[in-house]
Amino acid sequence: MSEIVLLSGSPSEQSRSELVLDYLAKLVDQEGRSTEKISVRNVSPEDLFYARYESEAIEEIATTIQQAKGVIVASPVYKASYSGILKALIDLLPQDVLKDTPVFPIMTGGSKSHLLAIEYALKPLLATLKGQNLKGVYLLDNQINKSSRARPITNEDCDQRLKKQLVYFLEMIQKQVPLAF
């Protein structure tokens, strides 16, 4: 079981949002926590298109997410919202898959015009799954250098915002108290 699941909602192989997730995974690993990345690109198109809830792969994804102490979700902005393929995957997961789980939402986009997509699209979606949403971070495409995997965030203020939210996310996970029955 991984402590933190990184969920990539990008269908692109050259994804800025996935690059940000990889960067955060490295920072999380440096804190001594385990991570596991789930990418929508690795989910069977047939499972998604035919809504195969009972698919072994979908059930495994659901279990991995349910057992995580925290989830980081990243998606590019498509038509002022998250990617459709991310929604297709989320539609197949149990309605309370994120119950009481800290969730760190991240979106990437080409302009400041879509800044509120994280507030009006992604965060409400994650809330319907019973996740505990953090503030989240929206990054502009020009703030991410695709050729630098080690340090992809080119804007220092943006990098600090991302790290600050990651620290807050890890603190929320640390404060979780297991229920005893």
Image: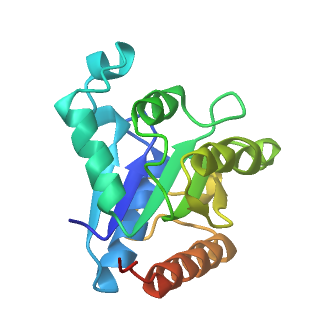
Against 159, residue 138 (above or below) is above
- Tally of numbered discs: 0
Q: Residue at x 29, y 21 (%)?
A: 47
Q: Residue furthest top?
A: 50
Question: Could you tell me residue 60's position as x and y percent?
Answer: 22, 43
Q: Is residue 47 left or right of residue 118?
A: left
> Quarter of the image containing the C terminus?
bottom left
Residue at 65% from the left image edge and 75% from the top image edge: 161
Identify which residue, 76 or 4, lies in the foreground: 4
Q: Relative to 42, does residue 146 appear above or below in the rendering? A: below
Q: Is residue 109 visible?
A: no
Tell me which residue sits at (64%, 63%) in the image.
136
Question: Quick one: 160 or 9, which is closer to the camera?
Answer: 9
Q: Which residue: 28% across, 31% down?
A: 43
User: On the picture, is 118 further left or further right than 38?
Assistant: right
| Residue placed furthest toward the front | 181
In the image: residue 17, left or right of residue 157: left
Q: Residue 57 is drawn in which quadrant?
A: top left
